[in-house]
Amino acid sequence: MLKLDAFLIEGGRKLKGSVRISGSKNAALPCLFASLLTDDVCVIENVPDLRDIRTAVALLQQLGKKVVRKNSRVEIGPARRLQHHASYDLVRRMRASVVVMGPLLARLGKARVSLPGGCSIGARPINFHLQAFKKLGAAIRVEEGYVEATAPVLRGRRIRFPFPSVGATENALMAAVLAEGKTVLLNAAREPEIQDLAECLRSMGARIHGHGTGTIVIDGVPSLHGTRHVVIPDRIEAGTFLAAAAITRGRLLLRRVNPAHLSAVLNALRRAGLRLEVGRSEILAAWTKPLRPVSLKTRVYPGFPTDMQAQWMALMATVNGKSRITETIFENRFLHAQELLRMGAAIDIRGAAAVIEGGRRLSGCPLMVSDLRAGAALVLAGLAAQGRTKVLRVYHLDRGYERMERKLRAVGARIRRIAQ
């Protein structure tokens, strides 16, 4: 049962200090599921302690895997008997669970997986996943809320995605590594999380090249072996803390981060006037003068990430002048705007665009979180607001931010978790 906790925030304090960025949830999840492709031991390190990770561990155990977790290290051992059925009870909690289909289909020739759940930010159908499986030779049936895929043999093909979907690319990639012959994924997703999964699979013996580009080539192999893999830093957590430095007029040093994964966010912050000093694995963000409004569009990687759109809106609401945010990835991702309006922000939603008249003083009030990144935006707004903000339904935040309130408190925020 979900814990209906809330955050209480006393706003108006500048954040100062250093923050250690956790491992990427969106990279860790497919790497954990990649362990289904072998009976050998796989050790995945730098795994964040999040609700979605705990769901993934429970799903691996349900499928028969032995899983031992110690701090940020997860060891996945052989399955007594690998199962092909991923139940609704677990898959409904996390959309990324659908990515078990590819490895199960590759290993067992069949998979029965519940249609996924996750955040309410648009339809996000899995058609691209299923079309890729069909191309590889699978028969697909959808009934009673489950997808059933069967394929005695998977054979490599050229697969062109209508859109560079991260999940579909991950699923097709994991199915193709054990397929017969060569698979070419065209218009594939290029995100760092895709690159990290490919490196994990390569360390298991997969033959993959082109990851990080729109064309990924996979030469199938008969089997994979175990591995030890370190997950990349979470670029969205890093971007959120950069925005926290900006919105509170503070100064934060981010440690254990990969700046190369944040180029679009860093460019937007520089355009806004935030001082940035970028090292190999550190970023110093310091507010030194009033920021400027910056308009932008969300894009697939390497463009500005949709997962930073809500946080950018919160920041722009506090900056004098007019800005415009156009959302091109998800059709229902402005749910946070209504809550920001309750705090005194001036935001006009015009279809896929939000026009922000920034510079109004935000006032603390009770707020309701609708999804993971909307929750991050509301926390940022609460940090900048005058008075007390109560952020409800923070279980959404627990899906993607490791000990968020503790990290914020360590750099000067007045924030605490309370039970409802």
Image: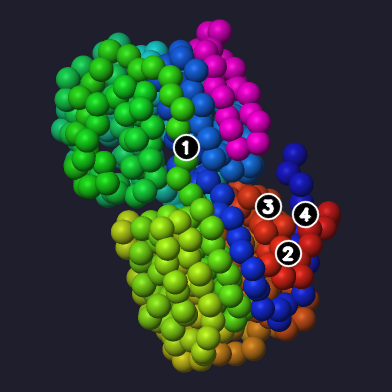
- Single out the residue that lies furthest toward the top: 80
Decide whether residue 61 is among the magenta residues. Answer: yes
Q: Secondary structure at mark 4?
A: loop
The reply to whether dot 1 and dot 3 touch (C-beta < 8 Å) is: no
Amino acid, disc 3: Arg
Q: Secondary structure at mark 2?
A: helix
Residue type pointed to by label 4: Asp
Give me the residue at 67% from left, 59% from top: 407
Q: Give residue 5's mark.
A: 4
Compare marks 4 and 2 and give the one earlier in the sequence: 4
Please give the range of residues in magenta: 60-82
Query: Front-most of 100 and 237?
Result: 237
Amino acid at dot 1: Val
Question: Could you tell me residue 401's position as x and y percent?
Answer: 61, 53
The residue under label 2 is which amino acid type? Arg
Number of marks in the image?
Answer: 4
Numbered tag placed on residue 409 in the rendering: 2
- Quadrant holding the C terminus: bottom right
Q: Residue at x 51, y 53 (%)?
A: 256
Rendered image quadrant of residue 343:
bottom right
Q: Nearer the viewer, mark 4 or mark 2?
A: 2
Label 3 and label 4: CA atoms lie apart by 13 Å
3D distance between C-alphas at marks 4 and 2: 17 Å
Q: Position of residue 193 (x, y in %)?
A: 39, 45
Cα–Cα span, label 4 and label 1: 31 Å
The picture places residue 364, in percent across and down from the top left corner, at 73, 78
Residue at image mark 1: 230
Which tag is nearer the camera, tag 3 or tag 4?
A: 3
Task: Answer with mark 2 or mark 1, whichever residue precedes in sequence.
Answer: 1
